[in-house]
Image: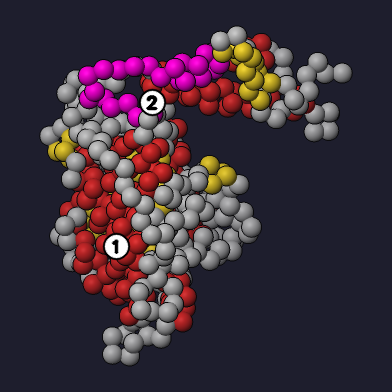
Amino acid sequence: MSKWDRRRVMKGMVKGVGVTVALPFLDYFLNGNGTALASGAPMPERFGTWGYGLGGTRKLFVPQQTGPNYDLPEELASWAPIRDDVNLFTNGHAIRDASPNGNHFTGWVVSRTGIAPESGSGPSETIDLTVAKQIGGATRFTNLTATATADARDTYSYYNASTPNAPEWSPLAFYQRLFGLDFQNPNADEFQQDPRVIARRSVLSGIMDQERSLMETVGVADRERLDQYFTGLRQLERQFEQRLTKPEPIASCMPPGEAPVDVAMDQSTDSIKLRHQMMAELMAMAVACDQTRVFNMTYSAAFSSTIKPGYEKPHHTCTHEEPVDEALGYQLNASYFTRRAMESWVDFVEVFKKIPEGDGTLLDNVLILGTTDVGNARTHSIDGMSVFLAGRAGGKVKSGNHIDLNGGSVAQVGYTALRLMGVDTPSWGTLSNECSEVISDVLV
């Protein structure tokens, strides 16, 4: 009989009081059937994503010209202040091979994982969390995720098929989490170690001391599980160390002086725009203060329920039911919703552009991937899709280009972003979405 069972825990001590942390479920528990900073250091790498639902109206969204100085069709007219900061990729496909087209799902999943999901399955690990493993371990938050929809179910970030990365949905709660009592201002004259963090580190140290004895006891499969488990704990240990070390001053870190007042949590375009702006500003400042290096923002869900004041149908219903205006040749109200989404994309890019950093701005030192779920809003097709890349990734990217993907997989953009963020993988994605070459047009 095993000397352990599935209730086995790791034990540590805090001030003489025993503390336990559960182990992961192991086979062992089963039977046989089962630019530079002021200090001279390089700027940290940062990566973010932004997502919205229902694509656009192709003839109003896709520029006629490729390359730099591309034209801005009606639905992209708001991009004028940021056009030179964004690479726009159009005419990409979410190639499903033998997989079904999961409505409002397959498109964004391929863009963020390179894998067309099987029927009934969720997405695999999304690109943001892959990048977080590479660059997110040295900050207070491995990643930050927020949504402007006021619904915590609306996220495009997943750890695996069954585990979404739940977003913050309240601007006030987001402020309190980022800049409340636990925030350590890097520009403060004094620094005091948080006794709660000291206690947590003490517990963790005791647990980590037991790693070797465990590894020597279990089988090969369980060693792999434990290695993953302890890798996560080591990352947590690094985060504790970071929080117990006085941070270097950061000139660009200017935390907000007071908490925001929560706005109405309805689905009107005005309320969503305001919530989005508030949370974008908080998120950008958290990046500037080096609280995180990976971040995600949802403007609207794939089944967007955004409401236009005075119009009875929400965005998603509108794309199905609104007739095409005979004089204009497109769905007037559906296009209205796309234009509002693009205005908020501009807002998101501009909050990073407005924060000075080094010899430039914060936007110069980040890379932001923007995705949607379909190509043409009215038909919900997953061909002819668009993807955005904003920022210059610390000088690695030349921005301001319109690039025609010529029917290739939208995953090409994600793979390019992965490589720019230092993820050393020879390929990304599966089957027809597998990519092994970066898009050289955006590289310096």
Outermost residue, top side: 16
Q: What residue is rendered at 63% in x and 59% in y?
A: 119
Q: Is residue 262 left or right of residue 5?
A: left
Specify which label sits upstream in the sequence, 2 or 1: 2
Residue 138: image tag: 2
Q: Is residue 333 above or below residue 401?
A: below
Residue 226: say if magenta.
no
Does residue 188 belong to the magenta stretch?
Answer: yes
Q: Which residue is mark 1?
A: 342
Question: Residue flagged by tag 1: what amino acid is it?
Answer: Met
| Quadrant where the image shows the N terminus | top right
Task: Sort mark 1 into few (<14), some (14-19) or many (20+) by Cα contacts within 10 Å.
Answer: some
Q: Is residue 291 left or right of residue 204?
A: left
Classify residue 128 by image quadrant: top left
Of 274 and 131, the residue lying toward us: 274
On the image, which quarter does residue 217 sit in? Answer: top right
Which residue appears at 48% of the width and 65% of the height?
303
Q: Is residue 178 visible?
A: yes
The residue stretch that appears in magenta: 182-205
